[in-house]
Image (tube, coloured by chain):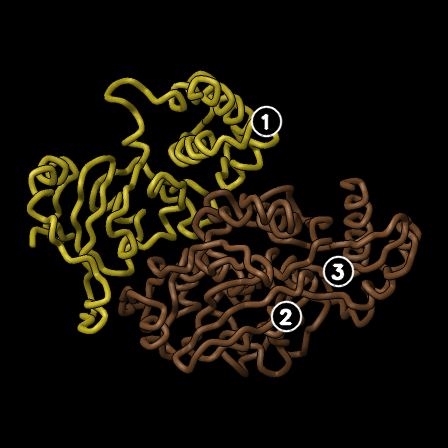
Chain colours: A brown, B yellow
């Protein structure tokens, strides 16, 4: 690990005032410490933000506001999250391991870096890590890589399950920087790789996520997260689906659909949502609508199985959701 | 400020026997905080944590992980280094009663924290119910992952949500056993769960 300066700011204002482009905020450390050991991340300065007052979960008029330092486990076990947004609790419980869920904050979860093996190996090129150096994954080992939102510069998958559930719910994030506060949709936080895969987020240097807001959406209580992976637990997704459905009798009125393991960022499927709306809640409808998930996919040499796996995962999620009614 | 540094090469025994005495003397050791930000010295950070009930003041390089400090400086070698990347669970300990992987925990962040390792689990010569259960059910072969398994299982039982074998497997999935003693581990957790209630 490279040397860094360590400090513990006493307030959010102080944290964002002290942060510069070479600064990393340290919360649970499960991404940062790992990547500092690998020297993939080499911040000159680390600000330990764990003592900042960003640990509350509060029901507001807008919805449920979750402080960015709340641990994954504590979000997953929260009564209101489980009752009103089961897709969020399930996505969290399907993530990482018990130890890591105890440690990792939800702000950090949303900003975790890709698991692409080339990104994590400083001895090889990577456009994300060293802009312009090339992407060995495009022609290399790419079974786990993305099929949506890719570019010739980067095909790395976004690894967060939580982000998939939150994007389906139109969650927003509150951000604080030395120039003030703003709230943006989580979807807009994530950038497509394009020619600049090293730019992953719409964050200014030193900008800090202070909270995640789950908007009020009464029918989100009828939601589910299904994750398909190489082993049953403690593994990143090959394909995952976050689905919420509003039904009136046997008709789907509205649906929210997002997938993980597929995109360079958590991927909302508006075409599938549109194809579900107004249709009878039957397996045939689910099959037909899920076919729209394949719009624009770009499979790579080792992951040609992914589009069909995504489609089937969606159908399964819709069927399993029906059973929870 | 009485601190223990690596160069002093203090043994665990010396440290533990001394630290009870120094505990009161270091009550005012400044934790790095708001004031430290202003005059941030590169280099070491003073931290006072409690390890297995013993107040332990340390000065650390901010890069030092809890795992390395436990093993190399405090000589608490029960905690094992497997992958050193947060993937295997062999280094699992408790911080403030919660299970964490010590390889991804920087000691600099642990001012005031209460750390429990496998060495702190038994009551003198009387084994903790989980330790006994791992013996009773052959919950290991080589034993390398066992301290992490036991610390993880203690937190799982404390949490109280894992009751069935499947739930235990799911909650324990962050602890890899390459000898594949999993059936014995699940049986051991089940036995201890009943005894610890």
Q: Are marks 1 and 2 on the same chain?
A: no
Q: Is residue B121 above or below residue A284?
A: above
User: At which x and y percent is residue A203?
Assistant: 50, 77
The image quadrant of residue B148 is top left
Mark 2: secondary structure? helix
Residue bearing the label numbered 1:
B165
Task: Kindly state the secondary structure of the residue where label 3 is placed.
Answer: strand
User: For the residue carrying disc 3, how many other residues have a C-alpha within 10 Å: few (<14), some (14-19), or many (20+)?
Assistant: many
Q: Are marks 1 and 3 on the same chain?
A: no
Q: Nearer the viewer, mark 1 or mark 3?
A: 3
Q: Nearer the viewer, mark 1 or mark 2?
A: 2
Q: Position of residue A263 (x, y in %)?
A: 68, 66
| SS at badge 1 | helix
In the picture, the quarter occupied by the N terminus of chain B is: bottom left
Between the residue at mark 3 and the residue at mark 2, the CA separation in whole angstroms equals 14 Å
Subunit ID for the residue under disc 2: A
Front one among B39 and A37: B39
**Numbered disc 1: what chain?**
B
Whole-percent x, y for residue A307 in the image: 79, 61
Q: What's the residue at 59%, 26% (across, down)?
A: B164
* Chain containing the residue with disc 3: A
- In this rendering, does residue A28 appear at all? yes
Residue assigned mark 2: A187
Residue A176 coordinates in the image, percent (x, y): 44, 73
Badge number at residue A115: none
Mark 3 and mark 2 lie on one chain; the one further toward the N terminus is 2
Distance (Cα) linking label 1 and label 3: 34 Å
* Residue under the point 56% across and 62% down: A213
Considering every residue shown, the one lying at the far front of the view is: A61
Q: Residues within 10 Å of mark 1 (few under 14, many from 20)?
A: some
User: Which residue, given by chain and number where applicable, does mark 3 sit on?
Assistant: A256
Where residue B182 sits, quadrant-wise, is top right
């Amino acid at each position: 690990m490279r040397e860094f300066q360590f400090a513990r700011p006493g307030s959010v204002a102080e944290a964002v005032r002290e942060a510069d482009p070479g600064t990393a905020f340290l919360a649970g450390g499960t991404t940062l410490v790992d990547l500092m050991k690998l020297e993939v991340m080499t911040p000159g300065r680390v600000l330990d933000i764990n003592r900042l007052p960003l640990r509350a979960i509060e029901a507001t008029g807008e919805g449920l506001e979750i402080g960015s330092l709340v641990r994954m486990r504590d979000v997953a076990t929260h009564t209101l999250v489980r009752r009103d947004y089961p897709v969020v609790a399930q996505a969290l419980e399907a993530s990482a391991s018990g130890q890591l869920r105890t440690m990792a904050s939800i702000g950090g979860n949303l900003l975790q870096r890709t698991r692409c093996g080339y990104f994590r190996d400083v001895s090889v090129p990577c456009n994300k890590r060293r802009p312009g150096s090339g992407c060995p994954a495009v022609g290399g080992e790419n079974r786990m890589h993305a099929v949506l939102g890719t570019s010739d510069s980067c095909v790395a998958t976004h690894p967060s399950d939580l982000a998939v559930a939150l994007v389906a719910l139109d969650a927003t994030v509150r951000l604080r920087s030395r120039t003030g506060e703003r709230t943006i949709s989580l979807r807009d936080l994530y950038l497509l790789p394009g020619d600049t895969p090293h730019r992953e987020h719409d964050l200014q240097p030193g900008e800090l996520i202070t909270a995640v807001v789950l908007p009020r959406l009464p029918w989100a209580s009828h939601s589910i997260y299904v994750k398909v992976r190489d082993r049953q637990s403690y593994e990143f997704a090959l394909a995952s689906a976050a689905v919420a459905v509003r039904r009136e009798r046997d008709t789907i009125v509205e649906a929210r659909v997002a997938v993980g393991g597929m995109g360079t960022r958590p991927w909302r499927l508006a075409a599938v949502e549109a194809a579900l709306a107004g249709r009878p809640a039957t397996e045939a409808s689910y099959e037909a609508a899920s076919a729209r998930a394949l719009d624009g996919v770009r499979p790579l040499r080792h992951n040609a199985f992914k589009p069909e796996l995504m489609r089937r995962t969606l159908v399964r999620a819709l069927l399993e959701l029906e059973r929870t009614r | 400020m009485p601190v223990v540094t690596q160069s002093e090469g203090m043994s665990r025994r010396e440290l533990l026997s001394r630290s009870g005495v120094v505990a009161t003397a270091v009550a005012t050791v400044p934790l790095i905080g708001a004031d430290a930000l202003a005059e941030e010295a590169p280099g070491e950070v003073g931290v006072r944590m409690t390890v297995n009930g013993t107040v332990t003041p340390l000065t650390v390089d901010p890069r030092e992980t809890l795992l390395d400090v436990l093993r190399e400086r405090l000589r608490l070698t029960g905690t094992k280094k497997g992958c050193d990347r947060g993937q295997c669970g062999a280094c699992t300990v408790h911080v403030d009663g919660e299970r964490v992987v010590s390889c991804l925990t920087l000691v600099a962040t642990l001012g005031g924290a209460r750390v429990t390792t496998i060495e702190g689990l038994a009551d003198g010569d009387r084994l903790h119910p989980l330790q006994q259960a791992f013996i009773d059910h052959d919950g290991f072969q080589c034993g390398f992952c066992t301290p992490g398994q036991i610390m993880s299982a203690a937190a799982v039982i404390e949490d109280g949500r894992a009751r069935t074998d499947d739930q235990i497997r799911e909650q324990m999935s962050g602890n890899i056993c390459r000898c594949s003693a999993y059936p014995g581990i699940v049986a051991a957790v089940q036995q201890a769960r009943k005894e610890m209630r």
